[in-house]
Amino acid sequence: MRILVVEDDAVLLDGLKVGLGLSGFTVDTVATLADATEALAADRFDAVVLDRMLPDGSGLEVLACLRERGDRTPVLLLTAKDETADRIDGLDAGADDYLGKPFDLDEVAARLRAITRRSEGRARPELRCGTIVLDPAGMAARKAGEPVPLSRREFSILRALMESPGMIHSKQALEQRLYGWQEDVESNTVEVHVHKLRAKLGAASIETIRGVGYRMGKSE
């Protein structure tokens, strides 16, 4: 899952990048309103962690621009302004959730999982496809009840495929789930990880649509 974090405190920004990365997220970061606006216009993210108070304006301006153009990307507001009226303003402006500073990184990750789950219309936290079950919170997978060890990137690809069962995912789309802006993408990375996933889950678990991409079957 690819996340954009908008935060002007360098220490906090680095902590969010590292902490959310350990929770299985691919994290891109910016520190200003202008950079956030540019990033959201150029790329697609699964969710946004947005500081309300930025050096060149309010994070609510970013939020307003998203909602005015019909962009439903889930947004979690982070702010030191945590009075009831502030939370109401943020939620009424279109935020999906609101968290005051200081906060726990595990709670940020949990809230991101919750708002993205709601945006996808899923009621239960686990993803299921046949006998394969994926637990996003625990970064764990099972097949027919047996645990399946996965690397972080294998987990990310499997999650992308299981979030939209029956949908074809291009190699480029999967690469965007795996890598942030500053990371180099190897040409055969997706193919290698899909090969490893098939070895662990079964050859028929992931279908190749030649020249188009990959997909998994309908969920139960």
Image: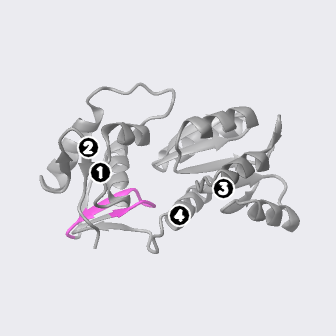
- Which residue sits furthest front? 69
Local secondary structure at mark 3: strand
Magenta span: 134-144
Q: Residue at x 17, y 41 (%)?
A: 210
| For discs 4 and 1, the disc positioned in front in the rendered view | 1
Amino acid type at image mark 3: Leu
Q: Which mark is residue 119?
A: 4
Q: Nearer the viewer, residue 12 or 123?
A: 123
Instruction: Quadrant for residue 8, please give it.
Output: top right
From the viewer's perspective, is 116 left or right of 136? right
Q: Amino acid at mark 2?
A: Gly
The amino acid sitting under disc 1 is: Ile
Residue 115 picture location, percent across and down = 57, 63
Classify mark 2: helix, strand or loop: strand
Q: Quadrant of the C terminus?
A: bottom left
Q: What's the CA distance linking mark 4 and mark 2?
A: 24 Å
**Labelled disc at residue 76:** 3
